[in-house]
Amino acid sequence: MRPLGQGSQLRTVTIVGLAALPVAIARYVMKGWVEPYGVPPAVGSLLSSLTVLLLAGMVLIFSQEARTPAGRYVVAAGWFTLLAAWIEAVIIVCILLAGRFGADTYYQGPWESVRHAFPTPEQHAMAHVAGFFPKVLLGLALGAVVYGIERRRRAVARV
């Protein structure tokens, strides 16, 4: 088994993890920039979504690992979990910052139902803590599909 820091996974996680910071900032300020132009809250939220960034990172991590001759699903799963934890921490910090400063951002939820379900930023942040493991499990399941597809493609290409 390869050591965890070897190969392109460290680079991928670092790049996607660092990309989360400007996306997080954009998500913080974007609502005020795009809504006056008639951009619906759901679209604006999607354009600055850290979860979409995590999904892209998941595809990169699992497909790269599957294409590596000595690649293993468990290695990709470890890197994905690390990236998911980082992105979730960024989301939670931004929710709490938006609440602390009373900013009207997508971190309060692009839909009124989010504000209704979680009336305080602390409740919203705790929901993200509670939702972390289901999100990771879903990412690992989707990653298994990506990993399987890439492994099959690699096997077919060898033949």
Image (spheres, rainbow, N blue to C red):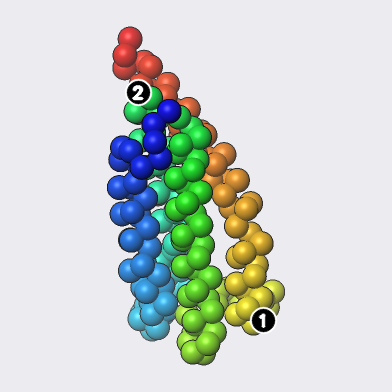
Q: Neighbour class for label 1 at 10 Å: few (<14), some, many (≥20)? A: few
Q: Nearer the viewer, mark 1 or mark 2?
A: 2
Left or right of 12 on screen, residue 145: right
Badge 2: how crowded within 10 Å, few (<14), some, or many (20+)? few
- Vertical comparison of 111 with 71: above or below: below
Q: How many marks?
A: 2
Is residue 141 at least partly visible in the picture?
yes
Task: Give the farthest residue toward the top.
Answer: 159
What's the residue type where badge 1 is placed? Pro
Quarter the C terminus occupies? top left
* Residue at the bottom extreme of this rendering: 102
Q: Residue at x 62, y 53 (%)?
A: 133
Question: Does any portion of residue 43 appear in the rendered image?
Answer: no
Above or below, 137 relative to 86: above
Q: Residue at x 58, y 46 (%)?
A: 138
Looking at the rendered image, the quarter that the N terminus falls into is top left
In the image, residue 49 sits, relative to residue 159, either above or below, namely: below
Front residue of 44/6: it is 6
- Residue 68 spot, x, y in % from top left: 34, 28
Instruction: Left or right? Give the position of 112 relative to 105.
Output: right
Q: Which residue is mark 2?
A: 69
Q: Which residue is disc 1 drawn over?
A: 119
**Among numbered discs 1 and 2, the one appearing first in the sequence:** 2
In whole angstroms, how far apart are the C-alphas of marks 1 and 2? 50 Å
Helix, strand or loop at label 1? It is loop
Q: Which mark is residue 23?
A: none
Where residue 10 appears, as percent x and y from the top left, is 34, 46
Q: Amino acid at mark 2?
A: Pro
Which residue sits at x=50%, y=35%? 74
**x%, y% of residue 116?**
68, 78
Q: Residue furthest front?
A: 3
